[in-house]
Amino acid sequence: MPSSSSSAVLRTWDSSSRGKRDHILSEFIQTCSSLNAAQMEEALDHSASLFLARISSSLRMTYGLGKPVVLHIRAIHVFLSAESGQRFLTEFVEVGGVPALLGVFLTRKPSVTDKLAAIKLLSLIARAGRHYKEVICESNGLESLHELMTSMAYEDLVRDSSELLASLCRSNPRYAAQAHLTLLSLLASDLPTTQRYAAASLRSLLSQHAAAAAVALPDAAGCASPSPPQPSTVLEPGDAHIDAAIRLLNTANLQVQYEAEQLLNAIFAWPMLQLTLLSKLVEVVADLSEKEMAQVPPRTRSIAAHLLAQLLTALPTEARSSYSELLDVVPWLCFLLLSEKIECQRSAIQALQLLGCCSGSPPGGNPGP
């Protein structure tokens, strides 16, 4: 936006039609994206805050009419991402910018492009710190993200929404537990894309939390880490995490199955849940529940058998032997050998080989049809 015309930008904006305003926004984005806050003030003839306020107001009016708002959001992104532009962020939030963005991606009329731009801007705001994460949560951001992810299957949108949810679980003590439960509830979605990204985000959170806890523990010499991380506000996993992840093994979507297995591996890092997780995998392998018998596909039993053996072999010898005996793991794997399905037989053999109960080396690869 040339400085010679910048002094008139506010007057031009106020007197322009929607089409002309889109042109002004495009020119601003192109010209000012690389400017810091001071340079932007100079380019806008020291009217940057007033121009941001006008764009913010126009955003609320425009999306309510079902008109495209991606240029509005990208222009605001230029302000908020500018170096030394903290005051622009404060001003945008104070005029109700966060509820406006949440309104954009919950309104049916705006396009996926509009919604994706809104998510990216919300993510930028969340990265600014705890206060801004709280503002998003207090504006019903968690409920809005849940609704978005259970109603739309566009991969980029679901991925970015899931990452935003995960970020709200970190350094956000007031709302971290609620954000974590929101992610957990998304595992029950009917949309494979949502299941996959929610499982991946949960896995990342649990792995980071487990690693932080391990760093804070004393080492073999009895010395704790010299700089242990700050206590995490992420919920520790429980039975609900195990049940939700095991249910995902029933899906026919291979990507979701993979993320379910990875999530179960992350949960297994918590010693107090190891016995529960192993016992639930044994139930799947043995198909113990008559009510669920018709709902457990052979492939699910195969995956559970392989995962069961994989988790057991990761344990110290004494613990592995104790759990195997307590849960009758080997007898149930032998029972799986009697299945009419070749994939179940193959997985049972692989699992028994991993546990050292059969001669020969375990075949490579995961069980397949």
Image: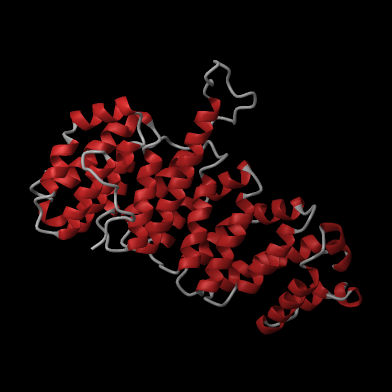
> Which residue extends farthest right?
4
Along the viewing direction, whichever of 200 and 326 lies nearer the viewer:
326
The answer, for residue 232, to whether it is visible in the render is no
Above-or-below relation of 113 to 313: below
Left or right, 198 with respect to 355, comes to right
In the rendered view of the protein, which quadrant contains the C terminus? Answer: bottom left
> Which residue extends farthest front?
360
- Name which residue lies at 59% across and 61% down: 120
Along the viewing direction, whichever of 20 and 160 lies nearer the viewer:
160
Above-or-below relation of 99 to 334: below
Q: Quadrant of residue 71?
A: bottom right
Total marks in image: 0
In the rendered view of the protein, which quadrant contains the N terminus? Answer: bottom right
Q: Position of residue 18 (x, y in %)?
A: 66, 81
Q: Position of residue 13 (x, y in %)?
A: 75, 76
Q: Quadrant of residue 366?
A: bottom left
Q: Quadrant of residue 327?
A: top left
Left or right, 230 with respect to 161, comes to right
- Name which residue lies at 46% across and 56% down: 145
Above-or-below relation of 48 to 1: above
Q: Position of residue 4 (x, y in %)?
A: 92, 76
Along the viewing direction, whichever of 59 and 306 lies nearer the viewer:
306
Along the viewing direction, whichever of 292 and 33 lies nearer the viewer:
292
- Name which residue lies at 40% across and 52% down: 199
- Name which residue lies at 53% across and 46% down: 168
> Which residue extends farthest top?
222
Above-or-below relation of 311 to 31: above
Q: Position of residue 96 (x, y in %)?
A: 61, 56
The answer, for residue 171, to whether it is visible in the render is yes
